[in-house]
């Protein structure tokens, strides 16, 4: 697993494997947010299967699919709500982690300075400078 910490409460990762969920719980995460749409994965990585395995591992699970380039207000609000409801460290994942990092950044727009959001993502290996206008 390639887990990249953004803050104390949120980390992001490229696609995780079903067998990773127990290890994720063992690392202290309390919830997982699946940002990868089901139409991008096979049945072994479907949100339904991952949700069941997360529950078996004692993790909360939220399915907030992000299609490339499609970051609606409703989607950003759903991500923020899943993060807030977790009451502990959360791991969000997608294909590469970029969409998860981006939706986190957009959920923090207006709460944190844009340069801080971009620097946080950059420290984790994600260049989000292209969304700076949306973070102000």
Image (spheres, helix red, strand yellow):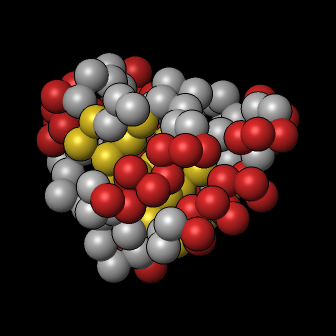
Q: What is the x, y in percent for residue 81?
A: 50, 72
Residue placed at 50% from the left, 25% from the top?
Answer: 96
When asked about the image quadrant of residue 17, the answer is top right
Residue 118 shows in the view? no
When asked about the image quadrant of residue 115, the answer is top left
How many numbered badges does the structure rendering display?
A: 0
Residue placed at 27% from the left, 55% from the top?
Answer: 27
Residue placed at 71% from the left, 40% from the top?
Answer: 45
Question: Going by the image, does 5 lie left or right of 59?
Answer: left
When asked about the image quadrant of residue 62, the answer is bottom right
Residue 58 shows in the view? yes
Q: In the image shown, does 17 or 64 lie closer to the viewer?
A: 17
Q: Quadrant of the C terminus?
A: top left
Q: In the image shown, does 92 or 122 lie closer to the viewer?
A: 92
Question: Going by the image, does 74 lie left or right of 105?
Answer: right
Q: What is the x, y in percent for residue 134?
A: 42, 40
Question: Going by the image, does 9 lie left or right of 49?
Answer: left
Q: Quadrant of the N terminus?
A: top left
Q: In the image shown, does 130 or 18 lie closer to the viewer?
A: 18
Vertical placement of residue 126 versus 104, above or below: above
Vertical placement of residue 96 versus 111, above or below: above
Q: What is the x, y in percent for residue 53?
A: 63, 60
């Amino acid at each position: 697993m390639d887990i990249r910490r953004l803050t104390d409460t949120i980390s992001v990762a490229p696609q995780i494997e079903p067998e990773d969920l127990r290890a994720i719980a063992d690392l202290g995460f309390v919830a997982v947010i699946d940002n990868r749409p089901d139409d991008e994965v096979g049945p072994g990585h479907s949100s339904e299967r991952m949700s069941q395995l997360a529950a078996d591992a004692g993790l909360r699970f939220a399915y907030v699919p992000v299609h490339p380039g499609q970051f609606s207000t409703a989607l950003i609000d759903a991500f923020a709500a899943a993060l807030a409801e977790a009451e502990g460290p959360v791991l969000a994942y997608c294909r590469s982690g970029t969409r998860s990092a981006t939706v986190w950044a957009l959920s923090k727009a207006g709460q944190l300075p844009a340069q801080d959001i971009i620097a946080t993502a950059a420290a984790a290996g994600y260049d989000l400078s292209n969304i700076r206008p949306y973070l102000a």
